[in-house]
Image (tube, rainbow, N blue to C red):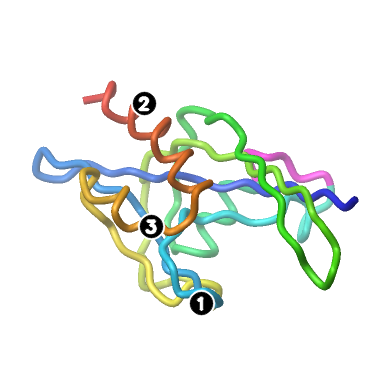
Amino acid sequence: MKTEQSAGGVVFKRKDNKTFILIAKHSAYHRWVFPKGLIGDKIQNESKEDTALREVQEETGVNGKILYPLKPVIYWYQFEGQKIKKTVYYFVMEYLAGDITKHDFEMEDVKWELLENVSTKLAFKGDKKVWEEAKLYIQTLF
């Protein structure tokens, strides 16, 4: 059995007394997700937190500040006939700066979605699960 670990972020910003959440449409499967990527695929011994910040920046063009770690999401998938156990570490992040038009090729679109609409956009069970915890935390901030 193969295992993988990834890290990513649920990024929010406030504007005009409304809360917006950063979501990205993946180029390979054309569905809305939270940005994430493999830990250690580019930088040896990279921490979960550093990976999450880097992946959010690469995939969305946005720089964030980690505020809160979320419970890891664990799921299984098949790749080239091999069963892989994947653990994803997400962090709630506050938007600091950046331009969503500066995202990389992995995402075909990136947008700021109103907090109340996010759950209807997300395609995968893991993203929906992490969103429920992230939403509760973000709502306590305002």
Amino acid carrying label 2: it is Tyr
| Residue indicated by mark 2 | 137
| Residue indicated by mark 1 | 27
Q: Is residue 46 magenta?
A: yes
**Quadrant in which residue 96 is drawn:** top left
Give the Cα distance between marks 3 and 1: 13 Å
Residue pictured at 32% horizontal, 30% vertical: 138
Where is residue 72 drawn, in percent x and y? 61, 34
| Residue indicated by mark 3 | 23
Q: Is residue 57 magenta?
A: no
| Residue furthest to the right | 1
Residue pictured at 52% horizontal, 37% vertical: 91
CB within 8 Å, label 2 to label 1:
no
CB within 8 Å, label 3 to label 2:
no
Where is residue 122 drawn, in percent x and y? 39, 55
Amino acid carrying label 3: it is Ile
Where is residue 117 drawn, in percent x and y? 23, 50
Residue 127 vertical placement versus 134 (above, below): below
Element carrying mark 3: strand
The magenta-colored residue range is 45-50
